[in-house]
Image (tube, rainbow, N blue to C red):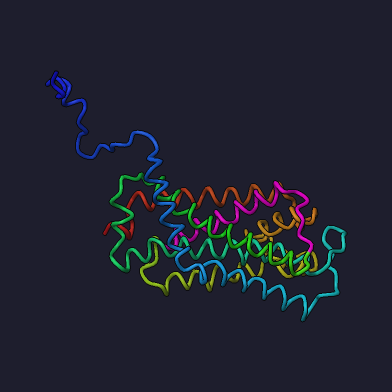
């Protein structure tokens, strides 16, 4: 018997130019991209994982020893030891969100600088699959650093036992996704390292430090309290802190909605820019 299909069926088996071969999700390609992103930061794990973990732990040591080791912080009418108060904010902002942004903002930008952007554009991946792989890789780095910092803080003597694990997981995922998407957006726009550094230095770092990580916003003047409530980092840190301490500076439901909406808006913006090929395909 002949292994060739009947002549009338040849046209239906061949794909027309421009028609993708993968009709559904290209799970193999998505998995390969994710592994590539994870292996990329694991090759230099001393810089990408251990350095931010140690830096975050140093923040905790310096602030607890120098300023508030014996002074409790009142949150929701409850006095909380200063170290226990700042630890969750340090984990999510410095330990998880910062590395997630750094990883995502590096991928496409370096491809454009080195001329290897074709490695992301040529494989048979849809725009959504490409975005998912980049964001998932960045979130993995953030989660690994966060777990490392959490374990180190437990050894340091900080009380970090989850009261509401769902809040830790929910706001941890929303926070790392937020910075991962912002990193992808930066990576699409940036043409050189200075561009990405500018976003990190003038947007990410100030928002992280002025978000209630080291203080309770209830103690601020009304004007500064209003500014803090306009900072999305504030809701992420407040919700993440609620998961460990059982109390927060803001309503958890409102914080969840605010951050989720921001994540959706950023995801749509990244998808639209990747699909259009802005500053990538030219």
Residue 183 part of the magenta-drawn span = yes
**153 to the left or right of 36:** right
Task: Indicate the quadrant containing the C terminus: top left, top right, bottom left or bottom right.
Answer: bottom left
Residue occupying image coordinates x 43% and y 57%: 37
Q: In this figure, what is the number of numbered marks? A: 0
Image location of residue 117, percent across then percent down: 31, 60
Kindly tell me whether residue 185 is visible in this rendering. Answer: yes
- On the picture, is 129 further left or further right than 171? left
Secondary structure mostly seen in magenta is helix
**In this view, 191 is above or below 62:** above
Q: Residue furthest front?
A: 1
- The residue closer to the viewer here, 274 or 49, is 49
Camera-nearest residue between 113 and 191: 113
Residue 168, horizontal then vertical, whole percent = 69, 52
Residue found at x 56% / y 52%: 262
The answer to whether 27 is drawn above or below residue 110 in the figure is: above
- Indicate the position of residue 86 as horizontal and vertical percent values: 74, 67
Which image quarter is the N terminus in?
Answer: top left
Q: Residue at image x 67%, y 60%?
A: 234
Q: Residue furthest bottom?
A: 66
Position of residue 18 relative to residue 239, above or below, is above
**Foreground residue, 262 or 37?**
37
**Where residue 112 sits: x, y (%)?**
32, 64
In which quadrant of the rendered view does residue 114 lie? Answer: bottom left
Does the magenta segment cover residue 239? no
Name the residue rendered at 78%, 68% in the picture.
157
Residue 231 shows in the view: no
Span shown in magenta: 159-187
Tell which of 74 and 257 is nearer to you: 74
């Amino acid at each position: 018997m002949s292994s060739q299909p009947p002549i009338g069926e040849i046209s239906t088996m061949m794909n027309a130019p421009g028609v993708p071969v993968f009709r559904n999700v290209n799970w193999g390609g998505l998995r390969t991209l994710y592994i590539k992103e994870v292996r990329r930061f694991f090759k230099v794990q001393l810089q990408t994982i251990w350095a931010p973990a140690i830096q975050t732990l140093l923040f905790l040591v310096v602030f607890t020893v120098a300023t508030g080791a014996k002074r409790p912080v009142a949150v929701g009418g409850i006095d909380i030891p200063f170290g226990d108060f700042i630890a969750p904010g340090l984990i999510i902002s410095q330990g998880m969100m910062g590395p997630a942004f750094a990883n995502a903002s590096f991928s496409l930008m370096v491809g454009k600088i080195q001329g290897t952007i074709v490695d992301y554009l040529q494989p048979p991946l849809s725009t959504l699959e490409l975005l998912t792989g980049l964001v998932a890789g960045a979130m993995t780095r953030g989660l690994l650093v966060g777990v490392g910092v959490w374990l180190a803080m437990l050894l340091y003597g900080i009380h970090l036992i989850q009261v509401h694990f769902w809040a830790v997981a929910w706001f941890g995922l929303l926070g790392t996704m937020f910075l991962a998407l912002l990193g992808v957006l930066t990576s699409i726009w940036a043409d050189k390292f200075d561009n990405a550094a500018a976003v990190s230095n003038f947007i990410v770092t100030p928002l992280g430090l002025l978000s209630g990580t080291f203080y309770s916003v209830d103690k601020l003047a009304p004007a500064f309290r209003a500014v803090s409530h306009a900072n999305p980092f504030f809701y992420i840190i407040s919700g993440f802190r609620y998961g460990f301490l059982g109390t927060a500076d803001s309503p958890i439901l409102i914080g969840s909605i605010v951050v989720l909406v921001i994540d959706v808006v950023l995801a749509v913006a990244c998808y639209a820019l990747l699909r259009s090929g802005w500053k990538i395909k030219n």
